[in-house]
Amino acid sequence: MWFLCVFFHRLLDYRRPEVESLAELFGAFEPMEDGSPVRPLSLEWNLPQNHHIDSPFHFVNLPSEDVARNIARRSMLVKGIYELWGEGITDDDLEKAIRGFPDERKLPYLKPESSFRITVDNFGKVISFQEQNERIRGLSYIPFKGRVDLRNPDHKFWLMEIDDYGENNGLPPVVERRIFFGREVGAADRKLLPTYQLKSRKYIGPTAMDAEIAFLMANQGLARPGKLIYDPFVGTGSILVAAAHFGAMTMILT
């Protein structure tokens, strides 16, 4: 199943490798008949048309929504993973794509008894609340029958756009505007970062690892219950703290 994977614009070289590791952690790779795992070189990835590898928008092929949801919830660098209903350069392109998306995949999320919310997100610039409302009204051709619930909806939809902003000011080079609309399958939960941030710890040293980097390393180390994480140069234990948070048993030597 192909999903739209949207990354935070940071630590660019680690974004795909983290997803690869979490895909393995959550069983994305089918076992062989003898029970040994098949480990492909990597997941299958694609980029939107005319996008650079540094773009926050990537397409990834994952075996199920459950795997996609688990990856998004645990990842440090994934902002969200979405079932893409349509994309295009213009609003007309987007409408055509959404109308062409199979009804059997849309209708279960448009029922009268369900609630929904649409969020507008623009990468590279800020748009006003009024503009956001105008963008949402522009989606009136989607036959939503449920009620709007901004706090706790059953289904969350995202209208995302990356613009041709000319001078990129450090942002990834993009050839043209691109608009995406999709249903949220899983979203990041980075609430643990403030809990483990260095300034909240009672003791740190010169080698204390930033919490985000430590959790990223724990993810790439496949930390989970039943795993042993051994750090021969533990220092102040930043990496082991992150691994222990995910349930791994930790061992130190210094």
Image: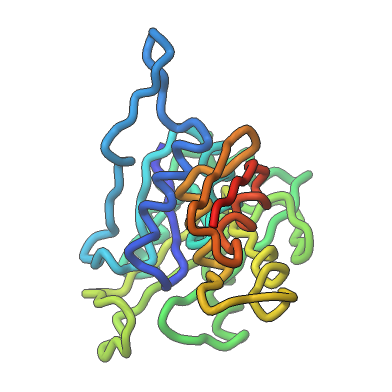
Q: Residue at coordinates 35% horizontally, 67% vertically from top-left?
A: 12
Q: x and y percent of residue 2 in the render?
A: 39, 42
Quadrant position of residue 28: top left
Q: Nearer the viewer, residue 219 or 173?
A: 219
- From this view, report whether residue 77 is shown above or below residue 72: below
Q: x and y percent of residue 113 in the render?
A: 78, 44
Q: Residue at coordinates 69% horizontally, 75% vertically from top-left?
A: 203
- From this view, report whether residue 182 is shown above or below residue 226: below
Q: Residue at coordinates 35% horizontally, 78% vertically from top-left?
A: 163
Residue lying farthest front?
254
Q: Quadrant where the N terminus lies? A: top left
Query: Is 191 situated left or right of 24 in this image?
Result: right
Q: Nearer the viewer, residue 158 or 221?
A: 221
Q: Quadrant where the C terminus lies? A: bottom right
Q: Nearer the viewer, residue 87 or 66?
A: 66
Q: x and y percent of residue 214 in the render?
A: 53, 62
